[in-house]
Image: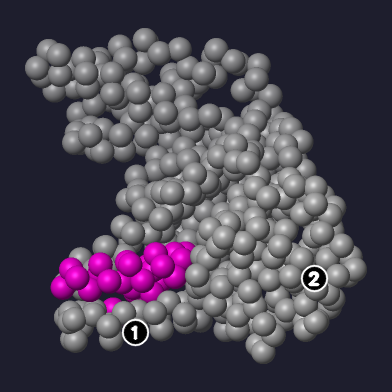
């Protein structure tokens, strides 16, 4: 109904050119007809036979006010006569209301200034619930499978178009099993998001205990779980907004972002800014992406290496639109953003209100390096008992978490080649073969660490204090 109200208000305000950019043409046609009420509505398509110029002439000469919907009109906007006629309609020189309807629209600047853009939101959960009930009435099976969870199915379908959701619900009922049906809906959503180059639904089963070190950010994340739910809202707590993780490459920023989805019990969706800027209209791509994110919420939105999408100036309108969304969003979207090149981060990105906290992820301390080695060994089926992990980790002060994982992988390969269990000497030999990034680019990494000492909250307890106690 919000679309209907917005459409009617635009017409009442005097707009004679309107644009509806959506892939849901059938739904848009139905809602436009509903918004027009008793006003006549005509739909024009290139396949309809009549030339566009004739359709516009008929609209302009009509005695009664009418609405003409031009479907997929983009290729015809290069015609100077058509463009001139549309400009006169937009200026009110002709008695007509024209609606541009299509999945992509790039209006000439003269038309864009006179056009009201009306957003068609994705179906709400209430609408999806009605669609699910309608699907149940029309399918051959009259009874619900045992354990059928209507709310879970509706949540799983959030973010799909009406057509996609209807197909997903029919496929779910065809499974005949409640659990399999829910998996089918989730699979359809993953397939739907897969058609979008900007969003990816990520399978994540990374528990918080699987993250080595970073005890401060792990405790912070665990405390945020309590901020979800009606009890927290009644107490006056806002929904958690997210975190920005800055720091040295390979030290666990992406890993802890994935773990955030597990600890918060939310799906993880990855936003790819490179794909947004590669699209023909980055502004439209970002708008559609955030619209889908809003519909799918609650979720964790993972923005990896955000400085590559927004730093260094970027595209001003895309950057401004994303900052506005970060600040003004009311839906439960927890944004987990990571950044390696902090010098490229625009200062307005880290302002409070857009993120709950800004963390700096440093090279791991000796205790954290020991923990990372142990976690990595356990993940690969080895207990680590009998290995001198503390002594091995202590001299590796320039090693990142990713490089320590590679130490374990190389040591296991060495032991496997000799058909025996891994030893402490295998780990030491593997470490000697790796030149860490912090050594290769020592000046750059040290400058980054200097920045992090005073400008962000540490993701780990003070490493100097920890190493003092270790000594």
288 and 465: which is toward the camera: 288
Between tags 2 and 1, which lies in front? 2
Within the magenta stretch, is there residue 230?
Answer: no
Q: Give the farthest residue toward the bottom.
A: 38
Q: How many numbered marks appear?
A: 2
- Asked if residue 466 lies left or right of residue 210, the reply is right
Pointer 2: what residue? 60
Q: Residue at x 83, y 66 (%)?
A: 89
Residue 331 visible, this orientation: no
Pointer 1: what residue? 133
Q: Give the farthest residue toward the left.
A: 419
Q: Position of residue 400 (x, y in %)?
A: 47, 27
Quarter occupied by residue 233: bottom right
Q: Position of residue 134 (x, y in %)?
A: 34, 83
Q: Is residue 388 above or below residue 270?
A: above
Residues drawn in magenta: 149-176
Q: Residue at x 28, y 23 (%)?
A: 409
335 and 171: which is toward the camera: 171
Q: Position of residue 314 (x, y in %)?
A: 72, 37
- Asked if residue 372 lies left or right of residue 100, the reply is left
């Amino acid at each position: 109904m919000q679309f209907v109200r917005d459409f009617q208000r635009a017409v009442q305000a005097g707009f004679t050119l309107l644009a509806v950019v959506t892939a849901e043409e059938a739904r848009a046609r139905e809602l436009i007809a509903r918004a027009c009420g008793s006003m006549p509505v005509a739909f024009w398509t290139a396949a309809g036979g009549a030339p566009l110029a004739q359709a516009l002439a008929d609209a302009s000469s009509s005695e009664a006010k009418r609405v003409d919907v031009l479907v997929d009109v983009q290729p015809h906007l290069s015609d100077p006569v058509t463009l001139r006629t549309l400009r006169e309609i937009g200026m009110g020189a002709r008695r007509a209301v024209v609606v541009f309807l299509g999945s992509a629209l790039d209006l000439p600047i003269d038309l864009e200034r006179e056009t009201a853009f009306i957003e068609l939101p994705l179906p709400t959960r209430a609408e999806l619930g009605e669609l699910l009930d309608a699907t149940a009435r029309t399918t051959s099976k009259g009874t619900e499978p045992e354990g059928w969870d209507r709310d879970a199915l509706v949540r799983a379908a959030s973010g799909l178009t009406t057509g996609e959701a209807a197909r997903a619900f029919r496929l779910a009922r065809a499974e005949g099993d409640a659990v399999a049906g829910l998996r089918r809906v989730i699979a359809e959503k993953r397939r739907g998001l897969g058609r979008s180059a900007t969003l990816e639904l990520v399978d994540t089963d990374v528990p918080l205990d699987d993250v080595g070190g970073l005890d401060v950010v792990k405790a912070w994340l665990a405390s945020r779980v309590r901020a979800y739910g009606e009890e927290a809202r009644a107490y006056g707590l806002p929904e958690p907004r997210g975190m920005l993780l800055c720091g040295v490459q390979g030290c666990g920023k992406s890993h802890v972002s994935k773990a955030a989805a597990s600890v918060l019990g939310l799906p993880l969706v990855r936003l790819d800014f490179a794909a947004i800027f590669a699209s023909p209209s980055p502004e439209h791509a970002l708008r559609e992406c955030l619209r889908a994110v809003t519909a799918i919420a609650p979720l964790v939105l993972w923005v990896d290496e955000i400085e590559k999408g927004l730093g260094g100036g970027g595209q001003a309108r895309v950057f401004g639109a994303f900052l506005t969304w970060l600040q003004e969003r009311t839906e439960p979207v927890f944004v987990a953003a990571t950044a390696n090149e902090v010098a490229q981060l625009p200062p307005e990105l880290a302002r409070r209100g857009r993120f709950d906290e800004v963390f700096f992820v440093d090279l791991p301390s000796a205790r954290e390096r020991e923990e990372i080695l142990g976690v990595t060994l356990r993940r690969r089926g080895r207990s680590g008992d009998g290995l001198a992990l503390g002594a091995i980790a202590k001299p590796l002060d320039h090693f990142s978490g990713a490089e320590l994982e590679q130490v374990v992988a190389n040591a296991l390969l060495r032991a496997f080649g000799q058909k025996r269990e891994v030893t402490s000497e295998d780990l030491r030999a593997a470490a000697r073969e790796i030149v860490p990034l912090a050594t290769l680019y020592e000046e750059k990494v040290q400058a980054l660490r200097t920045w992090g000492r005073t400008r962000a909250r540490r993701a780990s307890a003070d490493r100097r204090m920890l190493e003092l106690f270790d000594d």
